[in-house]
Image (cartoon, rainbow, N blue to C red):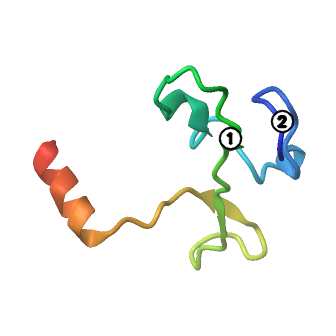
Amino acid sequence: RYGDGPKDVLALESNGDYTRDIGYLHFADFQNITGTGDNLLNNVWYQPEEVFPVDGTPEVRQHAFWVPVDTTYFNLSKNLE
């Protein structure tokens, strides 16, 4: 939400649907410093996917974190390692 900072509670965070351990991105950290003003973009938190594995307990959700990546960039990143 506009104006919320890293210490503000996220919607559904108390249920474990959002995490602050991974995926926090503050857009102003990546701007060119030109002195023309503050970056008005806010922050992004990733929401883990809810999964119900076939070999797990029925009706008990688990969280998995994944980000879809273009195949070209994925192969390039393997070469960088």
First in residue order: circle 1 vs circle 2: 2
Residue 75 image offset from top left, x and y in percent: 18, 62
Q: Quadrant of residue 27?
A: top right
Measured along the vertical axis of the image, is residue 73 above or below residue 53? above
Q: Where residue 24 sits in the image (x, y, percent)?
A: 61, 38
Q: Disc 2 marks which amino acid?
A: Asp
41 in relation to 8, above or below:
below
Q: Separation of disc 1 and disc 2 at Cα?
A: 8 Å
Q: Nearer the viewer, residue 40 or 44?
A: 40
Q: Quadrant of residue 38?
A: top right
Q: Is residue 70 left or right of residue 17?
A: left
Q: Extreme left residue here? A: 79
In the rendered structure, find residue 4 and report the number of the disc placed on it.
2
Residue at x 14% of width, y 44% of height:
80
Identify the secondary structure beneath mark 1: strand
Q: Which residue is mark 1?
A: 43
Quadrant (top left, top right, bottom left, bottom right) of the C terminus: top left
Q: Residue furthest top?
A: 35
Amino acid, disc 1: Asn
- The residue at the point 86 percent across, 32 percent down is 8
Tell me whether circle 1 and circle 2 mark residues in contact (CB < 8 Å): yes
Q: Quadrant of residue 28?
A: top right
Give the SS element for disc 2.
loop
